[in-house]
Image (cartoon, helix red, strand yellow):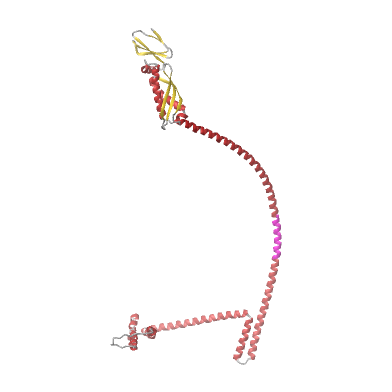
């Protein structure tokens, strides 16, 4: 018996002489009754409404996603048709659709869990491609090919998407306000630029006029400076010449005064000389003549300050030379005396030293007795076995004096008593 099927259906003949079974899509086949069996499977496109409610995204936001998928059993591919026959033979279209729907929904949920709400909402195409790719690779093993997948709806119960919409709306409104403000600003700027160019042109004109006026004033000032400089030079030259003339006149006056003063000094010197001669000639007694001469000399010195200063300077110089000569002479005398003493010490040695010490003994005794002479009151205490009074005090002074030779011998190594006996 012959059996036929349309292009949206496939027939599978199994039984006698049909191992493996014969699969025909859109055609006819002869089937032996009783020894062969024929089964049919639909190749119609299945439209699935893939709905995933309250699936948590990567950031933990629950959303509901609805997608539309078109799929069918591929009858042209023998391998896929064989896999579909193995999986769905004997099942109705609703049962096949339910199996594919659950598979798609699982993949859709898995992909939602790996994405954020923003990624799903803003890039629906990318989300649809990912679901299509993952579902196709899984359903192809069942002999089903995914024709298309489209994201239909995305919503949530937490107003998360609504908030994103508000933010976007606010951003658009803000951009609109900013654009309007920018346009107004540009208009104001262009108007200000035009006004600025107008004012700049006006100012440039005024600047050119001021520059020309400035050049005129500068040149005029330069000419005035040159004229005034010449006038000032002429006046300064005249004043300089007047000053030089006055200076020469003053110098000549000073020269005249110097000459007159010199002549006065000469006359005074001649007068002094004349009076000295007259004094020598007329005064007989030397004492009276000297006194008279000194009086006249004092009177003459009062009249000539210049000669007095010179005489004073000369006197100081002579006095200094005299004092220097005296100091030098005294130094030479002291040096000669020291040389004589050194020669005597060298010649007599210990005898000369003893002589010098004996010369100094009265001074030593005087220094020893000075504290006693300066005492206001002396209290003498005696045990009754020795002298008392002035004799005791004098004896102690003499006792100190008798110890001096021992002290001198310890200091200088010279024994006065031994030198005296030797001498």
242 lies above or below 173: below
Q: Residue at x 67, y 82 (%)?
A: 267
* Residue 259 showing in the rendered view: yes
Q: Which portion, as a residue range, is magenta?
A: 223-239
> Which quarter of the figure is the N terminus placed in?
top left
Q: Please indicate whether residue 255 sits to the left or right of residue 148 in the image.
A: right
Q: Main secondary structure of the magenta part?
A: helix
Residue 75 among those drawn in magenta: no
* Residue 80 showing in the rendered view: no
390 lies above or below 88: below
Q: Quadrant of residue 46?
A: top left
Give the farthest residue toward the left: 385
> Which quarter of the figure is the C terminus placed in?
bottom left
Q: Residue at x 41, y 83 (%)?
A: 341
Relative depth, front residue between 40 and 320: 40
Relative depth, front residue between 225 and 271: 225
Residue 110 % position (x, y) = 40, 27
Relative depth, front residue between 137 and 228: 137
Q: Quadrant of residue 359?
A: bottom left
Number of numbered callouts drawn? 0
Residue 236 among those drawn in magenta: yes
Residue 314 % position (x, y) = 58, 80
Residue 394 % position (x, y) = 34, 87
Q: Please indicate whether residue 202 sits to the left or right of residue 399 in the image.
A: right
Q: Residue at x 54, y 81 (%)?
A: 319
Q: Residue at x 70, y 58 (%)?
A: 228
186 lies above or below 378: above
Q: Quadrant of residue 405?
A: bottom left
17 lies above or below 308: above
Residue 21 % position (x, y) = 36, 13
Relative depth, front residue between 255 and 192: 192
């Amino acid at each position: 018996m012959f059996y036929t099927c349309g292009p949206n259906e496939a027939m599978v003949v199994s039984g006698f002489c049909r191992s493996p079974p014969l699969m025909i899509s859109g055609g006819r086949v002869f089937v032996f009754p009783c020894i062969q069996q024929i089964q049919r499977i639909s190749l119609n496109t299945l439209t699935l409404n893939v709905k995933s409610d309250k699936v948590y995204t990567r950031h933990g936001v629950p959303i509901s996603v609805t997608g539309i998928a078109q799929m069918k059993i591929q009858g042209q591919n023998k391998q896929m048709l064989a896999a579909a026959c193995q999986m769905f033979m004997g099942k109705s279209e609703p049962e096949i659709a339910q199996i594919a729907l659950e598979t798609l929904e699982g993949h859709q949920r898995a992909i939602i869990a790996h994405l954020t709400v923003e990624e799903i909402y803003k890039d629906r195409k990318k989300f649809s491609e990912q679901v299509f790719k993952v579902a196709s690779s899984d359903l192809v093993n069942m002999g089903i090919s995914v024709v298309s997948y489209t994201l239909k709806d995305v919503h949530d119960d937490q107003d998360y998407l609504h908030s994103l919409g508000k933010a976007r709306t606010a951003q658009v409104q803000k951009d609109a306000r900013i654009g309007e403000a920018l346009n107004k600003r540009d208009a104001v700027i262009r108007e200000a630029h035009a006004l600025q160019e107008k004012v700049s042109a006006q100012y440039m004109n005024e600047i050119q006029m001021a520059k020309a006026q400035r050049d005129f004033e500068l040149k005029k000032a330069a000419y005035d400076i040159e004229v005034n400089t010449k006038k000032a030079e002429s006046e300064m030259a005249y004043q300089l010449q007047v000053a030089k003339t006055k200076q020469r006149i003053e110098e000549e006056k000073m020269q005249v005064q110097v000459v007159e003063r010199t002549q006065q000094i000469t006359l005074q010197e001649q007068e002094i000389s004349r009076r000295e001669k007259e004094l020598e000639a007329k005064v007989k007694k030397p004492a009276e003549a000297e006194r008279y001469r000194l009086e006249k000399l004092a009177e003459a010195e009062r009249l000539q300050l210049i000669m007095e200063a010179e005489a004073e300077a000369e006197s100081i110089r002579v006095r200094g030379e005299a004092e220097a000569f005296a100091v030098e002479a005294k130094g030479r005398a002291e040096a000669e005396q020291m040389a004589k003493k050194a020669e005597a010490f060298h010649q007599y040695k210990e005898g000369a030293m003893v002589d010098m010490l004996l010369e100094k003994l009265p001074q030593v005794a005087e220094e020893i007795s000075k504290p006693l002479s300066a005492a206001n009151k002396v209290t003498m205490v005696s045990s009754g076995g020795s002298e008392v009074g002035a004799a005791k005090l004098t004896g102690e002074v003499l006792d100190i004096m008798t110890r001096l030779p021992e002290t001198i011998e310890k200091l200088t190594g010279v024994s006065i008593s031994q030198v005296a006996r030797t001498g």
